[in-house]
Amino acid sequence: MTVSQRVAIVTGGAQGIGRQIVKRLAADGYAVVLNFATSKVEAEQTVAEVVAAGGDAVAVQADVADEFAVARLFDTAERTYGGIDVVVNSAGIAVHGRMTDLDLAELDRVYRTNVRGTFVVDQQAARRVRSGGTIINISSTTPKLSMPGYAAYAASKAAVDAVTLILARELGERDITVNAVAPGATATALFLRGKDEETIARMAAASPMNRLGDPAEAAELVAFLVSPAARWINGQVLYVNGAAA
């Protein structure tokens, strides 16, 4: 590691938007610690692609809702690279169902990952990110849409927004920025799973640009937010949704 090299942790970095963020930050010269929960094969493939392109990355398994596992994740980053400058919390799950029908075990499951997981990761980030660093939580446009069937997921992402805005105020005196990136309907496996073509087309048409987002577009915004050009952007929820809301 050179003195100028910066270090990023990306949770949920094996698939979807998280995977694109890993590759984008690595292309910008970051050493990246890619966190995954169960997608070991995809995580190793992503690391291999980063290394083949001349970047530096390692994959570390951890359940983001387990505070001891997350502490070990941060320990690994510090031990491997000497410190942490950026944390991108991209880990998340989605459940859908009308409130009259939703199994409360599913509600607990989405809250455990999306709310508790965000809090646990942000807590470690708040303790360990170096001065001048950045914390970014991946939120969602769904809290603004009031879509039937999305109550559990949208509520969990509204909590992510609240945590983001409060943490930004708590860490400002240390010159650490905290923001949320809120994608709209984006062509990831998480979004496409269980949807028929008619549903996908209808959700794409919700944007006046008449398409789904690309995961790389969210990654580009993350890359900007961690750059020196974005140091005065703090405590914001930034939407990447093609004006779908």
Image (spheres, rainbow, N blue to C red):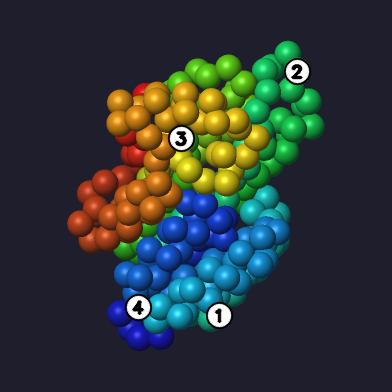
Q: CA distance from mark 1 to mark 3?
A: 37 Å
Q: Which residue is mark 4?
A: 5
Q: CA distance from mark 2 to mark 1?
A: 47 Å
What numbered label is drawn on residue 185?
3
Q: Which residue is mark 1?
A: 79
Q: CA distance from mark 3 to mark 4?
A: 34 Å
Q: Which residue is mark 2?
A: 101
**Residue type (three-letter) at the residue carrying disc 2:** Asp
Image coords of residue 190 (percent x, y): 59, 43
- Marks 3 & 4, CB-CB < 8 Å contact: no
Tell me which residue sits at (35%, 39%) in the image. Answer: 240
Image coords of residue 152 (percent x, y): 63, 27
In the visual, does 242 lie left or right of 191? left
Residue 234 found in image quarter: top left
Helix, strand or loop at label 1? It is helix
User: Looking at the image, is mark 1 or mark 4 earlier in the sequence?
Assistant: 4
**Residue type (three-letter) at the residue carrying disc 1:** Arg
Which-is-in-front pick, marks 1 and 3? 3
**Residue type (three-letter) at the residue carrying disc 3:** Ala
Count residues near mark 4 (Cα–Cα under 10 Å), then give few for <14, some for 14-19, many for 20+.
few
Helix, strand or loop at label 4? It is loop
